[in-house]
Image (tube, rainbow, N blue to C red):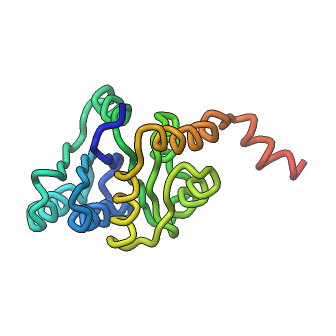
Amino acid sequence: PYSDSVICFGRLDASKRVSLLIDAAKLATEVRIAIYGAGPEEGPLRLQIERLGLGSRCRLYGHVPEDELIAALAQARGVFYGPYDEDYGYATIEAFLAEKPVITCNDSGEVSLIVGRTGGGWVVEPKAAAIAGALRELYRYDDVQLAGLGRSGASFARALSWQHVVEELVTPYL
């Protein structure tokens, strides 16, 4: 089942732009956010949550055991992953394998191409208002619609293989 939480997970680094999600949560008052991970931005993100008064619906869990993260991902409504110019973005693939829609930014590099190509979520401007709009839309979707988005991403993620990588990246140059 889909919970009422959007999750964000991974290294808490400035380039991952988790602060954009927190700013968006201030604008989208129906949204509940769960952030998993550790890194240099953990302290500043905690302060941002406190400063914006979001403690009741935006939680930063820090580093958690893998089984706890997997359980959160399995129940999430969706995933936010909006890094700047990411070269691949495993969080997107992990979210898709859990059949969860992904919200990302149009300058997130390969992540935005993957989400846009698969139709497995939303690709928006890297602005709090745009992310809040995608979050609101995510909350308007029912479980059937969410499952449809999740399956779109999952079919892409499940088709990935080393054979595909070799065929796409090496074979043309032989």
Q: Residue furthest toward the right? A: 174
The residue drawn where x is 32% and y is 59% is 13
Image quadrant in which the N terminus is located: top left
The image quarter in which residue 152 lies: top right
The image quarter in which residue 154 lies: top right
The residue drawn where x is 55% and y is 60% is 112
Q: Is residue 15 above or below residue 158?
A: below
Describe residue 63's horizontal placement relative to residue 150 as left or right.
Answer: left
Describe residue 2's horizontal placement relative to residue 105 as left or right.
Answer: left
Describe residue 78's horizontal placement relative to residue 121 as left or right.
Answer: left
The residue drawn where x is 52% and y is 45% is 149
Q: Is residue 46 above or below residue 69?
A: below
Tell me how many marks there are.
0
The residue drawn where x is 34% and y is 46% is 9
The spot of residue 103 in percent (x, y) is: 44, 56
The spot of residue 25 in percent (x, y) is: 25, 61
The spot of residue 7 in percent (x, y) is: 32, 46
Q: Is residue 8 above or below residue 2?
A: below
User: Relative to the observer, which residue lies in front, 88 or 25?
Assistant: 25
Q: Residue furthest toward the top? A: 67
The spot of residue 19 in percent (x, y) is: 27, 64
